[in-house]
Image (cartoon, coloured by chain):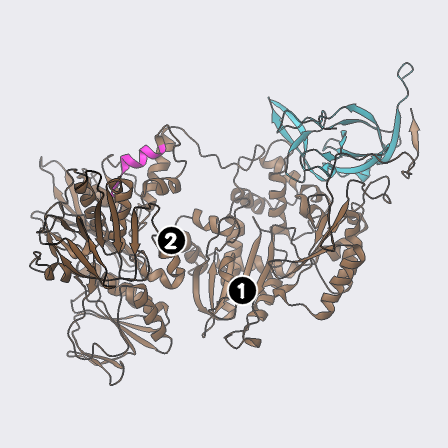
Amino acid sequence: MTTAPATTYTRVCRLDDIQREGGVLALVAGEAVAVFRTYDDRLFALANYDPFSRASVLARGIVGTRTVGGDEVTFVASPMHKQAFDLSTGQCLDDAAVRVPTYDVRLGEDGTVLVGGRTGGGTSS
Amino acid sequence: MSPHHRKTLVVAGHGMVGHRFVQAAIERGLTETYDVVVVGEESRAAYDRVALTSFFEVGADELSLLPGGAYDDPRVRLVLGTSVDAVDPETRTVLLGTGEVLVYDELVLATGATPFVPSVPGRDLPGCFVYRTIEDLEAIRDAAATATVGAVIGGGLLGLEAANALAQLGLETHVVEMAPRLMAVQVDAAGGATLARHVEKLGLTVHTGAMTEGVLGEDRVTGLQLRDAEPIEAQVVVFSAGIRPRDALARDAGLDLAERGGVLVDERCRTSDPHVWAIGECAAPGGRMYGLVAPGYAMAEVVVDALLGGPGAFTGADMSTKLKLLGVDVASFGDAHAVTEGALELVFSDAVAGHYKKLVVLENEAGDGTVLIGGVLVGDASAYGVLRPMVASGLELPANPEDLILPASRGVPEIGLPDEAVVCSCNNVTKATILDHVAREDEPCADATCVTRCSGAGSTCGSCKPTVKKIVEDHFAAVGKVVDRSLCEHFSLTRQELFDVVAVHGYRTFDEVVGGHGTGRGCDVCKPTVASILASQLNGHVLETGHGTLQDTNDAYLANIQRNGTYSVMPRIAGGEVTPEGLIVLGEVARDFGLYTKITGGQRIDLMGARMEELPAIWRRLVDAGFESGHAYGKSLRTVKSCVGSTWCRYGVQDSTSLAIMLENRYRGLRSPHKIKGGVSGCARECAEARAKDFGVIATEKGWNLYVGGNGGATPVHAVLLAGDLDTETLVRYLDRYLMYYIRTADRLQRTAPWMASLDGGIERVRAVVVEDSLGLGSELEAAIDAHVDGYFDEWRATLDDPDKLARFVSFVNAPDVPDPHITFREERGQPAPGDSDGPVVLGATIGVGAPAVTS
């Protein structure tokens, strides 16, 4: 971590504040970011804005898995019209042309969830 | 005459056969050269007379064969409510009752038949009826309202239908038959006796070998005088002693008639005048009249064929019959009376179960086997679908033909029908045609329902439906196609199977279910389904730890999400009854939180536009004022709509509002495969539109009629009568069973109407399980509902009392005081409406976020 540029992380909540296979909405540098915790305690963060319904809702979706090309992909289904988004890439699994931004997210040593900057851009923002 | 002159075809009569003729004329292109005028005497377009008795249950609209009231071909003109008074073959004209004269090139007589009323004294007294038209049934229904006893003269097919109708109308019913047994034409003596026992068990009184000498009464019917027997007291008498062809038009026109009545026609159905044809019950091909619809349909096709220059001929008809009379299956086919020389009878009789089955077989020509030539089935006619085509196709019988009728061969027997076997005799559909529909390249049918729709097989009397289904399923099995009914990629089970798995294992969490019977971590399909099943069985809070993340969008926040991410709030207003104080609270809450208000179709008030983080405060106010969750967000009971009933309405006969409130409170919160709506109307005017609901209750003078399986929405369906004149206790018991049966066996997101349509036997199956308790599940289903009622609690009150559950209702987990800037409103007609979204919103850096940033 000596050569990489400094990254600003926002302390969002404690890990226990996110239910397993659930999400919370965080305000990170003015942006609405959905933070998800999987069944095996991995963390993911996506922009909360659902490009299909044009509403800020993804954190309220159901988290599940889908087999894509033989691999198990963890996704969130938009609570509006159920389009699925790959939690690790933001790629929409139902429409190859749509992707939502992803964010850097990590678990701090004291059990807090930290969200950093964007790691992947979306197609509609 | 100009070569382009269009010819005119006049059809006299718009019954089932007349309608079929016109349909065939359109389909086969006869209207390319003919203008068709159809003249019907009744005010209604053709309707299904075979199902006439169901009129009381389903109403006239359901029976109509031409629901739009017009043909989808401008060259066909339908004239209703008009008689044809005379035919002049010389000038080729017909005279209508309106005075209009029509000139024809070809005339088709389809005038049908008229009920035969024996010339006994008193037969014209008020209270005497026949059983042929919807008007007849309406008159019988009106008369039955003030009567207690009814008698039907005639114990044949139609007579028993009429008796069924009288019994349905709540009358003590007598059947008077001159012959020594019921249905003398179709069944033999032993079959008739079995049938009589069934009928008597239902509370009807059967008088066979009884001669009616006269109808008693001065100004109206008081009873029947029988020869050598005590008179029968009755206020309603229905004559159903056979039919006579309506051949007067032909007779007056000088056309030849058959000896025993009917317009004499040749095998092309042409009368003695080359431009006049006759089809259906008014016709007598080769001197014989046919009183069933299938031969009439065949005649209609023959005439269309003849007019197109085709070779078709009518050479006799299959007079096989299968029907359900008073809940008893009766079937008769082929040579039922074994009159063929050398015929042998094979009889199975079970007096306890009330089954009587007879096969009539004949040694084949080679002398090395037997063929089936006829039979009689009473009490259990499930084998009919296979046996009748065997008669038609001359298929060799298996070595042990008794297997076909012994009780071990339940359901549809395993027997290979030849492709040319006619499976549906009403519409003349062969097995080959059915297979073609499922196997063809171009848009093949995926199931039996589709085959029925596309081929007509099973669309008239329905008796062959199980056979059609079997043929379709066997075909798919043979080509290795598995009909995949898996819920999703995580569960290769149907919802019903999953329901049973959860019940049997006593699972309490999704992890247990997916660990034991699924793969992966679930999805937006199986998680809400499992959540619903767990809620149905356990009655717990849907937001319990581990359950909250399974819930679909709306259940997850106990409110309905709207297009801009806000929610609507809908407290329960049971039966639509609300106090002025309650209304004021709703108004004040809406005003204080800036919510849009609207009255819903379910007699409630919707408060819309609440931000998620506002929901607890809104509900705090509502709960404190005595409101509770309305479950508008759940796949569960929504509302039980009601009219004001006998309390206020001058027409009401029962207190519909009280019943609606009681039912809504009984079933509130009950999680189900889809939403459930109910309705209660206080009289037959049906102001609560109960028959558009999943369950509808309509008051009668004697109690309640219970209708089930109705649906509004995209595919409207009228609910059908499950049981009539129930007291409140029985009504609730049946409803308990019905709803729990639905919850246990329906597919995910399957409303009650398609669920019932998917059951083998449809409403009859539901009636068997719910009313007759044929599975012996009644008390178990009731107990499940009782457990639900005992365990009910208000989800919103429980949420407000639990800080853990409340913690989720925040805008930003790290900035709970900052409202989500994506949500905006504009004003419309003085109320808020969702503002349009232009994309993601970034808040200015000046807004505090409640937690310090750290740098790593």
Chain of residue at mark 1? B
Q: Secondary structure at mark 1?
A: loop
Q: Nearer the viewer, mark 1 or mark 2?
A: 2
Residue B9 appears left or right of B806: left
Q: Residue furthest front?
A: B2
Give percent across and percent down for residue B172: 33, 74
Judge if badges 1 and 2 mark residues of a common chain: yes
B241 lies above or below B752: below
- Mark number displayed over residue A53: none
Chain of residue at mark 2? B
The part of the chain drawn in magenta is B426-438
Give percent across and percent down for residue B540: 67, 52
Q: Residue furthest top?
A: A3
Q: Is residue B429 magenta?
A: yes
The rendered magenta stretch, by its main secondary structure, is classed as: helix
Q: What hue represents chain B? A: brown
According to the picture, the residue beneath numbered tag 2 turns out to be: B67
